[in-house]
């Protein structure tokens, strides 16, 4: 079964929510986590190596759903943990999360998430086991990592079938709900930040986000996945779907979903427009300028 048929079928199966499955199965993720500790001077760096190894094993050595993935179907993703300060066992970090999915009948992979989490504080002692229990969160670090795992799964499955990622986004939302009861954990509370974990999952799961999720499917499945067989049709479908972003901005002018799309897709979309007609380019420049007025340099080529 191909990756596309897996995603298109499995959104109907709500038993995908199980976090642990048969050990013989392959993890859904092909993840690489690295720790950047350049800002930390005069300390033993072994703890960062230990934590990096432990986090890679934590992500890659377990099943997060009941879906069956062949080794070549795993979702490529990277996590970069940037340590800003460290005092005893207290870490203050940022986390850059990226994920990609293949485009049908091509060697091209498209970014589905490129998100920077600017506030991640946690405690960690070297060789401390990393644990996760979906009913009782024990660590801000593992809760955050698992939150992004389910967000990646949600966006990936959404790109293959309409709202196919709903079970995984519900899991991410449940983590936010539980984490809010921990007063010392940052990044989980409403109004703390317009682009934190709470804001991201709320935007993806509230009724106003349904249009974006349908657009996400149309962009990938009806657009990118069509381009190998018929580039003009794929491009036309993508352009036809873009007004959904305008509707989102009208309803939610500061929605984190706009920056989610811009950070992951704006350069790709500009390249797609490169082979459009002159009129399409001009219309595209106008539309994107209204959506992303601070990023016009990224699609300046469409202006002429």
Image (spheres, helix red, strand yellow):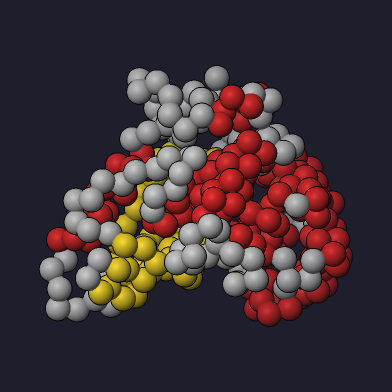
Q: Determine the residue positioned at 40% across, 43% down.
A: 132
Q: Determine the residue positioned at 49% across, 40% down.
A: 135
Horizontal side of 186 relative to 54 (left or right) equals right
Q: Determine the residue positioned at 27% across, 73% down.
A: 86
Horizontal side of 125 relative to 298 (left or right) equals left
Q: Quadrant of the N terminus?
A: top right
Q: Can you say whether 116 is above or below 217 in the image?
A: below
Q: Quadrant of the C terminus?
A: bottom right
- From the top left corner, tell me how far across and down residue 139 is, in percent: 38, 53
Residue 111 seen anywhere in this rendered image of the structure:
no
Q: Determine the residue positioned at 68% across, 71% down.
A: 299
Foreground: 85 or 68? 85
Foreground: 128 or 287? 128
Horizontal side of 179 relative to 71 (left or right) equals right
- From the top left corner, tell me how far across and down residue 45 is, in percent: 16, 66
- From the top left corner, tell me how far across and down residue 296 is, in percent: 69, 77
Q: Quadrant of residue 16?
A: top right
């Amino acid at each position: 079964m191909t990756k596309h048929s897996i995603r298109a079928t499995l959104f109907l199966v709500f038993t995908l929510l199980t976090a642990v499955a048969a050990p013989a199965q392959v993890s859904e993720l092909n993840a690489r986590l690295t720790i950047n500790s350049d800002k930390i001077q005069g300390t033993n760096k072994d703890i960062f190596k230990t934590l990096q190894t432990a986090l890679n094993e934590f992500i890659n050595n377990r099943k997060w759903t009941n879906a069956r993935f062949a080794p070549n179907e795993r979702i490529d993703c990277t996590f970069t943990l940037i340590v800003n300060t460290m005092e005893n066992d207290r870490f203050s970090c940022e986390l850059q999360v990226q994920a990609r999915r293949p485009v049908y009948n091509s060697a091209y992979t498209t970014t589905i998430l490129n998100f920077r989490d600017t506030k991640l504080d946690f405690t960690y002692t070297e060789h401390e086991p990393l644990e996760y229990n979906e009913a009782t969160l024990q660590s801000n670090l593992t809760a955050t990592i698992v939150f992004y795992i389910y967000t990646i799964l949600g966006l990936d499955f959404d790109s293959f079938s309409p709202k196919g990622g709903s079970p995984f986004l519900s899991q991410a939302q449940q983590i936010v709900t539980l984490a809010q009861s921990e007063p010392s954990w940052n990044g989980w509370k409403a109004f703390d930040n317009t682009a934190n974990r709470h804001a991201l999952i709320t935007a993806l799961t509230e009724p106003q986000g349904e249009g974006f999720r349908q657009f996400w499917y149309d962009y990938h499945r009806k657009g990118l996945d069509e381009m190998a067989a018929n580039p003009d049709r794929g491009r036309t479908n993508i352009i036809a779907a873009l007004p959904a972003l305008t509707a989102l901005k009208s309803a939610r002018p500061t929605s984190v979903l706009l920056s989610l799309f811009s950070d992951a897709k704006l350069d790709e979309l500009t390249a797609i427009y490169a082979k459009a007609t002159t009129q399409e380019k001009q219309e595209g420049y106008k539309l994107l300028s209204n959506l992303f007025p601070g990023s016009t340099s990224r699609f300046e080529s469409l202006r002429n």
